[in-house]
C-alpha cells in the first residue's frame, strides 16, 4: 500500500482527480486530492493566497502521512511540488509531474509561460481582476486549451467547477536546491497534444531538470479525464 497526494493545477480543484483517485483507492492505496487555498471548494479570498500558503497546506498533509508519499502535481501544481520537496524531502518517496511546470530555482510560472509561444493560454483567453488579484479563463476558450480529447460530459463538469486563479501563484518564483529538492526522485509524465503547456515547453523543462523517467501519454492537458485509466496505471506502477 502506498500514499498518494494529488495536487491540482490552475483554476481546478481536487475534483479533477476523481477518476484517478477512485482507481488508486480500489487497489487499497491511501489517496488525498485536496483543494488548494481559494480553489475548488475552498473560499479563501484570491488576493490573500500565496505560494508559501499553498506549500504549507500540502506539506502539512505530507507530514501527517504514516510513510513517505508519492506526490503528484498537474500543470501549475508542479511549483507546489517543488516547494514542498525543498522543505521536507525525506518525507516524499517520488515526485510525479503530470504535464506540469518543473521550474529551475528563481523562475516562475509566468516566466515559463511567456516562453511557450505556441501555447493557447494567451492574454486574449484570460480575464484579469485587479481588485481580487486573480485571473480567469474565458469560458469559450476552456475546451480548446484544456480538454481537446475529453468527452462533452467532462467538459461540462469542468466548466461548472473551474474558479479564478490567484495571480500570486503565477508570478512567484520557486526556490529550490540540488541538496534538498534535487535529492527526491522525480518522474515526468508528458502529454503530446497539450495546448496549454506544449510538448516543446515540457521537453525544455525536462532538459533543464532531468527526471529519473519520462512517460509519454498521447493526449491533451487533462489526462485525469481523457486518459484516466492509463494515468492511473502509471501511478500504480510507481
Image (cartoon, helix red, strand yellow):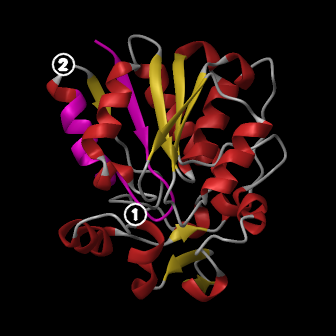
- Where 234 sits versus 66, above or below? below
- Where 80 sits versus 10, above or below? above
Relative placement, left or right, of 219 versus 105 is left
Q: Is residue 109 magenta?
A: no
Q: Cα distance, mark 1 to mark 2?
A: 31 Å
Of labels 1 and 2, earlier in sequence is: 2
Q: Which residue is more in the foreground, 232 or 108?
A: 232
Residue assigned mark 1: 43
Q: Which residue is more in the foreground, 118 or 141?
A: 118
Location of residue 81 (image quadrant)? top right
Q: Are marks 1 and 2 in contact (CB under 8 Å)?
A: no
Q: What x and y, as percent, mark residue 137? A: 49, 79
Q: Is residue 14 magenta?
A: yes
Q: Which residues are magenta?
A: 1-24
At a point 74% along the width and 58% down the height, the residue shown is: 112
Relative placement, left or right, of 136 versus 200 is left
Location of residue 171 (image quadrant)? bottom right
At a point 45% along the width and 20% down the height, the residue shown is: 69
Mark linked to residue 117: none
Residue assigned mark 2: 28
The reply to whether residue 130 is in sight is: no
Q: What x and y, as percent, mark residue 176? A: 78, 33
- Where 110 sits versus 74, above or below? below
Q: What x and y, as percent, mark residue 110? A: 73, 64
Q: Residue furthest left?
A: 26
Amino acid at each position: 500500500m502506498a500514499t498518494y497526494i494529488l495536487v491540482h493545477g490552475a483554476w481546478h480543484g481536487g475534483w479533477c482527480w476523481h477518476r484517478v483517485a477512485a482507481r488508486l483507492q480500489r487497489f487499497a492505496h491511501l489517496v488525498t486530492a485536496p483543494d488548494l487555498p481559494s480553489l475548488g471548494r475552498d473560499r479563501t479570498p484570491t488576493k490573500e493566497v500565496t505560494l508559501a500558503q499553498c506549500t504549507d497546506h500540502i506539506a502539512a498533509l505530507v507530514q501527517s502521512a504514516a510513510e513517505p508519499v508519492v506526490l503528484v502535481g498537474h500543470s501549475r501544481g508542479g511549483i507546489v511540488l517543488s516547494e514542498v520537496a525543498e522543505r521536507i524531502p525525506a518525507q516524499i518517496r517520488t515526485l510525479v509531474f503530470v504535464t506540469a511546470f518543473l521550474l529551475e530555482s528563481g523562475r516562475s510560472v509566468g516566466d515559463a509561460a511567456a516562453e511557450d509561444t505556441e501555447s493557447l493560454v494567451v492574454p486574449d483567453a484570460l480575464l484579469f481582476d485587479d481588485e481580487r488579484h486573480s485571473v480567469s479563463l474565458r469560458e469559450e476558450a476552456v475546451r480548446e486549451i484544456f480538454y481537446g480529447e475529453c468527452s462533452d460530459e467532462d467538459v461540462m463538469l469542468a466548466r461548472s467547477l473551474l474558479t479564478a486563479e490567484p495571480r500570486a501563484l503565477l508570478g512567484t518564483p520557486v526556490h529550490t536546491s540540488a541538496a534538498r529538492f534535487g535529492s527526491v526522485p522525480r518522474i515526468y509524465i508528458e502529454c503530446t497534444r497539450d495546448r496549454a503547456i506544449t510538448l516543446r515547453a515540457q521537453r525544455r523543462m525536462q532538459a533543464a531538470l532531468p527526471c529519473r523517467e519520462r512517460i509519454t501519454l498521447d493526449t491533451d492537458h487533462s489526462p485525469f479525464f481523457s486518459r484516466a485509466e492509463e494515468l492511473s496505471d502509471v501511478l500504480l506502477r510507481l
